[in-house]
Amino acid sequence: MPKRGKPPKAPEGYEQYPGNPYKFWPTLPPCTHRIEAVKGDPNCCGGTYNTIECKVIDDLVTRLDCRNCDGNPNWISGFDRHGDVFFKGHDGIGDNIYQRPFIKAACDYYQTVYLQTPWPQVYWDLPNLKFVKTNSYFRTQKINVKKQNGWSNVPYTVAHKKELKYSVIRFREHVSILEQFNQQFPIENFQLSMPVKDEWAFDVPDKFIVVHYPTLRREWLNGARNCKPEYIQQCVDWLKKDYTVISIAHIKDSEEWFVQKPRGCDQQFHHGELSIEQVSWLLSKSSLAISPVGFILPLGWAVGCKTFIIFGGAQHPKLLTHPKFSQSNLDCIIPEPFCDCNKIDHSCNKEIDLNKLKSRLFTFLEGSGE
């Protein structure tokens, strides 16, 4: 890339754009609303956004125009946004669901958000968001990347670069995925939610449940977190007389397989026949989803499906949830005593009393889930 010369002087009525001396935006007059508009002050922005003397501290100090802030949540728009940002996170479908609240907040804060992900469908409703292709080697992620179009490149002028990452080391310190994300990109008043499109719909029975049986993947053999497959099967046996049972998975010979072959299911989509959009819609319309630990936990939670997760070992539910999020549509049952070793190949205790399992299942199904 050729070297650029000395940055030009800003034209009259303009000033340098934060982080890019070759770009300019209009000079804004001082705030005429309040000189000291502090965080949460109802006299500025209706308490919706956080403003401190019309300046927000990020990687840079950026001045905001507060002229339209009196109760209008759209006051951060156009040139008032904080430049562009590039986010790099994890590639798993569940990880991307967990990232949604933070990327949504970033879309409110920055002018353009570039996100590297194999799952752009998860963010379909967010504005000013562009997707960057990831070179994942995981099978289902590669399949989804090949189906997508409209990938973007990250301009070299992007001033802000951030990562959303979590680590097993922090798990051992009892710091959850969402807490780790929030430490890297702090946000407030967030919810784990994802709207679904009517266009994702397909024909389904009137009254049904969705089940994901335990599987193992050659590329990541995390058997420790799986529950005993007979517990999933027992739940199906209890419910199949009242509900149509739809089983979903994406197995493939020598790549991913069931720990125990499912039985008693009315409809089976076991070879990736459903896209992530269709799975999301299916969950949103189901009476209940039953699954071991996996992507069903955050996805079912996000689309408002009653989601019943049966844990094995290795990772405690507290690592996969957050007290700020409403958990009225999520219930997790764990073995006792619980093994929180955070090792994927450990022989964890997975024993759950069947009477307790049945009681928790039906109480959750028939009640609020809280």
Image: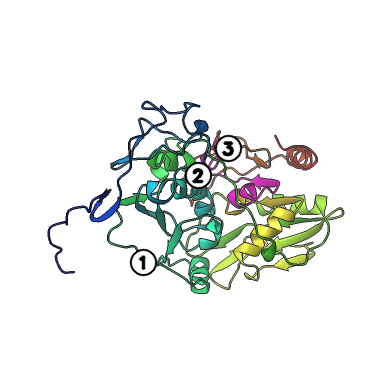
Question: What residue is shown with label 2?
Answer: 74
- Please, what is the three-letter code of the amino acid marked with disc 3? Phe
Residue at mark 2 to residue at mark 1: CA–CA distance: 28 Å
Picture coordinates of residue 166, whole percent (x, y): 42, 46
- Please, what is the three-letter code of the amino acid marked with disc 2? Asn
Picture coordinates of residue 254, whole percent (x, y): 54, 72
Residue nearer the viewer, 311 or 308: 308
Q: Give the label, 2 or 1, closer to the camera.
A: 2
Picture coordinates of residue 92, whole percent (x, y): 49, 57
Residue at mark 3 to residue at mark 2: CA–CA distance: 25 Å
Helix or strand or loop: what does disc 2 sit on? loop
Looking at the image, is 271 positioned above or below residue 260? below
Q: Give the label, 3 or 2, closer to the camera.
A: 2
Colouring rule applied to residues: rainbow
* Residue ID at (61%, 48%): 302
Question: What residue is shown with label 1?
Answer: 153
**Tag on residue 325?**
3
Q: Give the label, 3 or 1, closer to the camera.
A: 1
* Residue ID at (58%, 72%): 252
Residue range (magenta): 298-322
Which image quarter is the C terminus in? top right
Check contact, mark 3 vs mark 1: CB within 8 A: no
* Residue ID at (16%, 56%): 7
Picture coordinates of residue 255, whole percent (x, y): 53, 69
